[in-house]
Image (spheres, grey):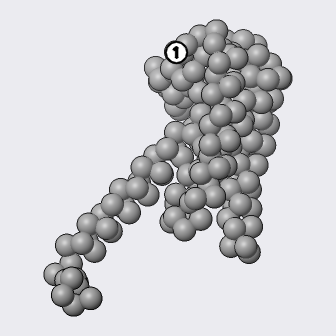
Amino acid sequence: MKKAIHNYLLLFSIALVIVVSDQWSKHLIRANLGLGEAFYPISFLKPFFRFTYWENTGAAFGLFQNTNIFLLVVSIIMSVVIIYSFHKAMDEPLIYRISLGLMLGGAIGNAIDRITLGFVTDFIAVGRFPVFNIADSCVTIGVGLMLLAMLIHERQEKQTNDDPLQIEKTDDES
């Protein structure tokens, strides 16, 4: 029971840090930049890296514009699935559990925007890549970490199964 509480504390702490930093950064952008206006925080990276205030009613890369309600429902379902599946991930490696916290925080951060504003505030612009935000980054990093954890787990299983020193019992030995 104590392990479960500790793990859920990890999940919700990661998600809370992401939601707070995501909402705070979006608030700063909306308060200080006009729609479409850019700010170059690192002058020698100009114009490659900038903060640009953008309102997104769709999904990543500008796909599915004007589907805010549908994407809100998807975010809520994702959040519920992550919390439910986290219960089954108690014995998974730490990197896997962290990935779920990142994805949960990102989903909640963007859901808050969709509920309160009717759009998601995007502001990080790098080169010609579509504008994104902290929540988007956390979902992407979370998926990447989850894939990495699965790859590591798969390799460990393969090494265990290929270990020539491992002696398997036959039916006769049982």
Question: In which quadrant will I find the C terminus?
Answer: bottom left
In percent of width and height, residue 142 lies at: 54, 46
- For mark 1, give the secondary structure: loop
Determine whether, in the image, residue 41 is placed left or right of residue 16.
left
| Residue name at image x 64 percent, y 9 percent | 66
**Which residue in the structure is indicated by mark 1?**
63
Residue extending farthest to the top is 66
4 or 44: nearer the viewer = 4
| Residue name at image x 59 percent, y 65 percent | 90
Question: In which quadrant will I find the N terminus?
Answer: bottom right
Residue 24 in view here: yes
Residue extending farthest to the bottom is 173
Work out whether 41 lies above or below 81. Answer: above
Work out whether 152 lies above or below 82. Answer: below
In percent of width and height, residue 56 lies at: 65, 16
Give amino acid for label 1.
Answer: Leu
| Residue name at image x 71 percent, y 60 percent | 8
